[in-house]
Amino acid sequence: MRFVEKIVRSRQFSGFILLVVLINSIALGLQTSPAVIEATGDLFFIVDKVCLYIFVLEAILKISVFRLGYFSRGWNWFDFIIVFCSLIADFEVLSSFRVLRIIRVFRALKFISGIRHLQIIVTAIGHSLPSIGWTSLLMSLIYYIFSVMGTMLFAEAFPQWFGSIPKTMYTLFQVMTLDGWSMDMARPIMEQFPFAWLYFVPFVVISAFIVLNIVVGIVVNSISEVSMELSAMKRPEGDRDRKVAEEIDKMRKILDNLERSLKGNR
Amino acid sequence: MRFVEKIVRSRQFSGFILLVVLINSIALGLQTSPAVIEATGDLFFIVDKVCLYIFVLEAILKISVFRLGYFSRGWNWFDFIIVFCSLIADFEVLSSFRVLRIIRVFRALKFISGIRHLQIIVTAIGHSLPSIGWTSLLMSLIYYIFSVMGTMLFAEAFPQWFGSIPKTMYTLFQVMTLDGWSMDMARPIMEQFPFAWLYFVPFVVISAFIVLNIVVGIVVNSISEVSMELSAMKRPEGDRDRKVAEEIDKMRKILDNLERSLKGNR
Amino acid sequence: MRFVEKIVRSRQFSGFILLVVLINSIALGLQTSPAVIEATGDLFFIVDKVCLYIFVLEAILKISVFRLGYFSRGWNWFDFIIVFCSLIADFEVLSSFRVLRIIRVFRALKFISGIRHLQIIVTAIGHSLPSIGWTSLLMSLIYYIFSVMGTMLFAEAFPQWFGSIPKTMYTLFQVMTLDGWSMDMARPIMEQFPFAWLYFVPFVVISAFIVLNIVVGIVVNSISEVSMELSAMKRPEGDRDRKVAEEIDKMRKILDNLERSLKGNR
Amino acid sequence: MRFVEKIVRSRQFSGFILLVVLINSIALGLQTSPAVIEATGDLFFIVDKVCLYIFVLEAILKISVFRLGYFSRGWNWFDFIIVFCSLIADFEVLSSFRVLRIIRVFRALKFISGIRHLQIIVTAIGHSLPSIGWTSLLMSLIYYIFSVMGTMLFAEAFPQWFGSIPKTMYTLFQVMTLDGWSMDMARPIMEQFPFAWLYFVPFVVISAFIVLNIVVGIVVNSISEVSMELSAMKRPEGDRDRKVAEEIDKMRKILDNLERSLKGNR
């Protein structure tokens, strides 16, 4: 068991896993080309299977070494779920559904858990999410109100865009990205409902404003974090200040003693 | 009356109101589906009515408890206006206008006055508005000048876009969002007026610049607010500095005394 | 003359001028409507003329009072040029050119020189321009290189977009704003030149990067200005520090004296 | 040799080279116009050749003066590669390929190495790249995963957009710029695959988020650099603080001496 632990903890092991992830990712890409598939036959499907079983083995080895400690690290969960879903999606019965084969692609995400720097970035992005949580709730509320309004107003005349709440929500997402919102959507609608701009223009302005708010929140957060680190780096100065204060305190005591002794002298 | 006040001030009461807002919002969403309406009959209309009367009751209870103090809080005004408008829009005579039914949707905005964090965000956005006030005035001025110019130049040839000042203003808003401004608008116009780009390109550049200015204003505002809070947190250090200064002052006095006494000694 | 100076310097005078600007602006807007023109006849043209002569009178009065000092203020130049151009454009001979009538619209810009806050914003925007000057030069260079390349490559096949350097420059401006750059332009071109994406994608990325650089420059500039003002506000603390240093200096001298005198004592 | 060095190092020499770059750039632009070519005959091709040989001469002179030191400066490499490629592309045999003639246009890039301020900006942009390196890697990973998925899902039904991995990558770049992503692409696809929005909306959100992250990284980087410079400018204060601390240290010693001597006195 000692020996297995040594292997699992070694840099060579994680390097090897990264290499397998890389091979698997390239294989997945090549499989999309009919020409490649024809030329190589079953090769890539075998590569795919082998890579999957290596990942399963990795998980088993790690669990056997770290036991329950394995599940105390978030990134292990991340790996475990990816491999577990791949495994399930790989069963013959299920793989008749074409969409399920796509789950294999997510194995490339193991790059994130395998490269320290990517872990850091994803964690940082994850940490910035709560700060925008309430703004997102506000966003959802505005979204919902406009969705209900849009469906009420335009469902009959323009069912392809506003036929139901989910359809309207998708349409509003498109409007938020400003893609063809006016030329291809608002203008045709305004020919029938001349006041439709009262629906579109406020939505564009409000959603732009809330998105701006989210962006500002993230920028300010990052800056204040950096400036806190900077001021923490300045602490040495603070140390010197404290020392000066202590020094002065001692001097004060000496002077007091001096004064008293001189008074006694007199 | 004491009893009513206790109820109104309780967390259970505001929780219950939030629940009613939630139910009402979901009901409003479901009403947009013809299938749901057919299956449930009048159910949702009754739910709607009941929710409205609960909100009316909430307002009456709060006013009876806080009296004029009710109107000294902005968010109470917010609630009051929403409920009042809903009530008016609900009268039989008026509800024949389909558009007025939409006012009911705004009841979902009561989420904002009901959840503390949303109140804070909306207030913060509101506070950032005055700082962009004058920039908005400049924006409006530029807008107006380009609207008059656009209408003068293109009203005859392209009435669908530049037929009147309001039409041109809407068109300029579209140009500002960059949706199809060149491919679907400026290029067809330039076939007739080859120098039309002298109108569109400056507008795109100037409006982008002013929008950028507004964004920068909001970012800088937020950052300076945060940095003020940070420097306020550092005040303890300032306290120590003041203490050191006082200490030194006292030492100075002792030394002066010492000097004088020693001189007298001599 | 004293009397005239008093008038020119009075708040009522600038208020009156602002009012005339407002009336003139509204008149210009209303003139775009054929219905209004028909109903009012020559009214608005007379209003227009009167407003112009009031502006001319304003300039004459100010020059007669401040003489050459008038031209030492930038905003007076601004006013002077607007009025002067309006005057020239108003001569019968010239006004047969429809485009020249548009110059009248620029009179609404007198709002900027008339309202203090707008002056400040425009001045601030003007001050931020030099900081982006060299980045703009770089931008122009990239623009020029891509224009020459685009014209060389696509002039024959797509003359409507890349027929000449100016046409290509306009097209590149459109690509920079991302309006229909791929769906309506790059894709049709790629059907003939499959490697056209090597032209479009780098241009989109590079121009986005330079624009980002300009934006960052403006943001950082604004923030460092604000933080400088903030640190200037903190000067009082610096004052206290200097005072403490002086105090300590004096104490040092007293102590030196004490030591010497005590040594003499011994 | 001394004489040549003097010339190469003179401001007149670099000014002359800049002038040649300018002339060459204008000549390249004019060559795109068939009318100009017809009117001037071979003139511009001669200008082009002469400019190229001047650049070659410049490189030879500089290398003969600075020898290997020439290649220790990045910007010399930049110049050298541009001229070298131009030279190769100019050989008769090769210039039958029209695309290779485009390489001449890159000579205008010599402006960057010739103007100090442009050098600084490009260097600054270059320095900001490493800080976004890992985020770009994450971006590429997400890109790759979505490319493979997109090709797997839509290759058969929409080969013009998702026919192969490179085609899908180009399409995803277009989606990232939000150009016609919904109106012209996602909506037609959703008619066949109603759940295609599960592919497009997450990609738009994730790519927007990562781009935002890159932008925030650059902004924060620039700000922290500026604030470091600012705090470096404040160092004088730090100097004074150190002086005060030393002063106090000396006073302490004097006082200690005094105390001891007074005790001895008693």
Image (tube, coloured by chain):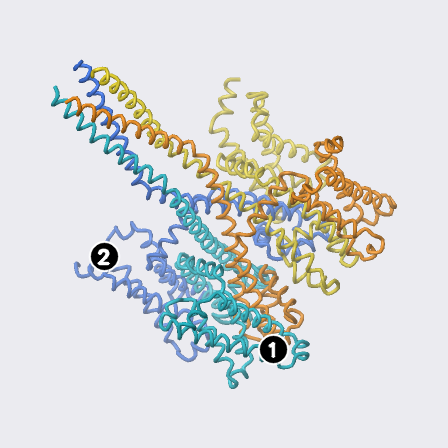
Chain colours: A yellow, B orange, C cyan, D blue
How far across and down, in percent of the image, does residue B121 sit? 60, 43
- Residue A195 in the image: state x and y as whole percent: 71, 61
Question: Could one spot residue A249 in this view of the protein?
Answer: yes
Rendered residue at 52%/71% (across/down):
C106
Please name the amino acid that badge 2 sits on.
Ser
Amino acid at circle 1: Phe
Q: Position of residue A170 (x, y in %)?
A: 69, 50
Is A38 left or right of D87, judged from the image as shown? right
In this rendering, position of residue D209 left or right of residue D18: right
Are the residues under badges 2 and 1 in a single subunit?
Answer: no
Report the chain holding disc 1. Answer: C
- Name which residue lies at 51% across and 72% down: C107
Location of the N terminus of chain D by quadrant is bottom left
Q: Which residue lies furthest to the bottom in this view?
A: C93
Q: Closer to the camera, D132 or D52?
A: D132
* Residue D162 visible in image: no
Q: Report how far apart the C-alphas of labels 2 and 1 lie in the structure.
A: 76 Å
In the image, is C169 to the left or to the right of D233? Answer: right
Circle 2 or circle 1, nearest the eye: 1
Residue at the disc numbered 1 = C44
Quadrant showing the C terminus of chain D:
top left
Determine whether the residue tagged by mark 2 lies in a helix, strand or loop.
Answer: helix
Nearer to us in this view, A30 or D77: D77
Relative vertical location of residue D190 with respect to residue A183 in this rendering, above or below? above
Name the chain letter of the residue that bears numbered label 2. D
| Residue A175, image x, y percentages | 65, 54
Q: Name the residue under label 2.
A: D64
- The residue lying toward the viewer, choosing from C242 and C77, is C242
Of helix, strand and loop, which one carries label 1? helix
